[in-house]
Image (spheres, rainbow, N blue to C red):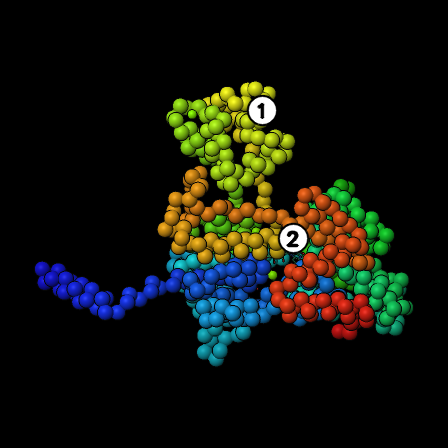
Amino acid sequence: LTAASGGGIVAYADSSRAEEAPEPPPRKKKVVVLGTGWAGTSFLKNLDSSRYEVKVISPRNYFAFTPLLPSVTCGTVEARSVVEPIRRMFEKKGKDVAYYEAECLKIDPTKKAVHCRSAVGTNLDGNGDFMLDYDYLVVALGAAVNTFNTPGVMEHCHFLKEVEDAQKIRKSVIDCFERASIPNISEEEKRKILHFVIIGGGPTGVEFAAELHDFLVEDLVKLYPAIEQFVKITIIQSGEHILNTFDQRIAVFAESKFQRDGIELSTGFRVIKVSDDSITVKCKSSGVETLVPYGMAIWSAGIGTRPVITDFMNQGKRRALATNEWLRVPECDSVYAIGDCSSISQRKIMEDISTIFKVADKDNSGTLTLKEINDVLEDICIRYPQVELYMKSMHMVDIADLIKGGLGDSHKESMVVNIEEFKKALCHVDSQVKTVPATAQVAAQQGYYLADCFNKKDHCTEHPEGPLRLTGSGEGHHNFRPFRYKHLGQFAPLGGEQAAAELPGDWVSMGHSTQWLWYSVYASKQVSWRTRVLVVSDWTRRFIFGRDSSR
Ligand code: FAD
Ligand code: MG
Ligand code: MG
Ligand code: MG
Ligand code: MG
């Protein structure tokens, strides 16, 4: 009784006080962002940080414009020109965004906290470790290099992932030339030292090979004329073609250009071991193993999962962290993952086929008419993009073609299907589910999309009834469209002022004019006017004076 009346008094006192002072605003939700690469910075730039208390963790206090890293390896562009300080990027956001230069060691989704360690070293008491709790966590940690456990790769190969890697490569290339210039070195030894091997014929490996070739023919041969004849560049690729994520025409163009340039392409070979002076390769068709002597090797054969992510996934079997189409990690409250560290698992239409049928069958007749299908078609296509892709791949113009397998027009209007026919018609659609590639373009679009979701979160909670009735497995923000990647094309710079580009609408363009397109696109994509000016002046300096070949 006493307790109850006491409670009443307290309540009364509280309400009287509330009349005097306005209610304090609700506590801002805490958002912790891990990583300041393409995905993380795109999210942060677009987030309305006045709605949230934002904390950012990354061991590097800058954003690196990775597409220009191959240019940094040969001094075409300076390292300083491709990085933008993180604190500068957020200075306009004021005190709503805090940055900590630290590494995330562990994600604890049950406590809703992350464990971090200062990247600048611990202080005298060893207090460099700290914990941050979150209401929402955005994981944008990127990918790690993947050596596929090939022996010797970690010890002897260079990688091209970070700015430091590019700087190391630049120094190491010059080292090789200086080493080969020392007197008393045999010709065989010179050939070995000046053999540059690139393992992996994807976009990064190819672009690096092109840069290196330009550096050699445009600058180094003039400075080291005595050893020019010993220089060789080789690309080792396990597939049959280089650039196999590009249009076939581009791969063919690149291969013939490299052949003319004297860059050797070893396709169909797998690297099985690397020692300090030779690479063991195995021919995939014949199984024969060969030793390739080398001076410098660059490994760009694949990306893998960072340990902190593997630990978080707790299974290690999946290559990347899976999210739903709204970029949220399922079975984990309030954790989102974007960029190279994650992959979207697109929901299959066959898993929901009965529900879709029921929702569409408004009159409960047990059959669907064309009108009933057309009424839900837009929702279906938003939720399951594979439907449109499938229809496109089969050259179908409307849904009736798909449902009735292309009947004559006279039958379309009066068509009705039962559940079995409906299932049969859609059973091959899921074969068209596409995975998004691990590129900056995807990472940036995901960051932008997620920030948009966060900015509208309140609105979505207040109005949970969205236009999407079929988002059945509803993920917090029902009335938000799932993330959809828009491919804007891709470039492959091939050296000698030539490039190849794949543009939307099946356009392919190659040659010198494409290189100018590349210059303008990459200048415009710079994250600030400062880096834009730096990059353009680096290019200009290179045109006039050539590259700097000092260490
Ligand atoms: P990242 O950009 O790698 O960012 C990861 C972030 O997480 C970094 O800030 C890192 O410091 C931080 N981090 C790492 N570990 C921790 C930790 N434990 N705790 C906290 N923070 C951590 N894509 C294109 O679309 N076009 C191109 O031309 C292109 N060229 C490329 C050239 C090169 C040489 C490379 C390496 C990549 C290129 N890419 C290109 C791919 C593109 O860079 C990636 O897809 C993109 O960087 C992915 O963005 P992300 O934010 O997921 O990861
Ligand atoms: Mg990132
Ligand atoms: Mg980056
Ligand atoms: Mg991804
Ligand atoms: Mg009906």
Q: Is mark 1 within 8 Å of ligand 5?
A: no
**Which residue bears the numbered disc 2?**
302
Identified by mark 1, the residue type is Gly
The residue at the point 75 percent across, 73 percent down is 551
Residue 398: % across, % down: 57, 30
Q: CA distance from mark 1 to mark 2?
A: 41 Å
Mark number, residue 396: none
> Which residue occupies 76% across, 58% down?
516
Q: Secondary structure at mark 1?
A: loop
Q: Is residue 525 above or below residue 125?
A: above
- Disc ID at residue 405: 1
Q: Position of residue 241 (x, y in %)?
A: 75, 45
Q: Choose the circle earlier in sequence order: 1 or 2.
A: 2
Residue at left offset 49%, top offset 60%? 47
- With respect to residue 414, does 228 lie above or below? below
Is 344 in front, or is 187?
344
- In the rendered image, residue 181, in percent from the top left (x then y), is placed at 85, 71
